[in-house]
Image: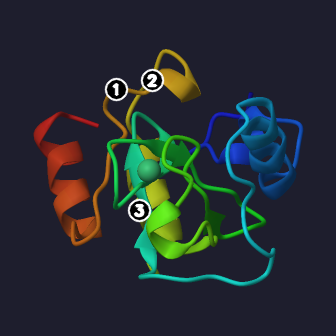
Amino acid sequence: MPDKILTHEDMMNLPYVRFVRSIASKKSMHAPAQDGVTAGTTLKARIDWGRWLVDCPDCPSAAMVSENERVYWCLSCGNASVKFAWRKVQMPQARKSIEAALMKRPAAQPNNAVTRNWKPGETVAELEKVNKDNGV
Ligand SMILES: [Zn+2]
């Protein structure tokens, strides 16, 4: 596992959309609607314990963001509120700077990096201040 802020592809072999379709099928869920079409509001990614995550707007579920396929389909509620369509996922414009600031923080494992967290709206300057305040 690379020492970086992780995405779906760092943890899973199957591409994200195929992964979701496979799990939905195994769980006998309603299948995701057409690939390449999105509905509802665009979801903003966040970083939690060193992983890019996206939260379901309809239930308490979340999933790792895909590097290659910026969509989300909830494996708990199936995006039923948008007729099982994929939802679009957005990474922040300052992604590289955010990741660089967080990667200065030590972690036992890249996927268990308790201090590597970021939420939309939080600035790189704020992250760097936390780094400085903690001597990293
Ligand atoms: Zn959900």
> Residue at 24% of width from left, 56% of height from top?
127
Q: Is residue 45 left or right of residue 122?
A: right
Q: How far apart are marks 2 and 1 (CA)?
A: 7 Å
Quarter location, residue 34: bottom right
Q: Is residue 76 left or right of residue 20?
A: left
Residue contact at pointers 2 and 1, CB within 8 angstroms: yes
Indicate the position of residue 131 as horizontal and vertical percent values: 23, 44
Q: Residues within 10 Å of mark 1 (few under 14, many from 20)?
A: some
Instruction: Name the amino acid, label 3.
Output: Ile
Q: How far apart are marks 1 and 3 (CA)?
A: 16 Å
Locate the C terminus by quadrant.
top left
- Is label 1 within 8 A of ligand 1 (CB to nearest ligand atom)? no
**Residue designated by label 1:** 114
> Residue at 40% of width from left, 33% of height from top?
49
Secondary structure state at the residue bearing disc 2: loop
73 over 83 or under it: above or below: above
**Residue designated by label 2:** 107
Q: Is residue 100 left or right of residue 3?
A: left
Mark 2 or mark 1, earlier in chain: 2
Instruction: Name the amino acid, label 1.
Output: Val
Between circles 1 and 3, the one closer to the viewer is 1
Secondary structure state at the residue bearing disc 3: helix
Residue contact at pointers 2 and 3, CB within 8 angstroms: no
Indicate the position of residue 105 as horizontal and vertical percent values: 38, 35
> Residue at 74% of width from left, 27% of height from top?
1
**Residue 16 visible within the image:** yes
**Residue designated by label 3:** 98
Mark 2 or mark 3, earlier in chain: 3
Indicate the position of residue 52 as horizontal and vertical percent values: 51, 50
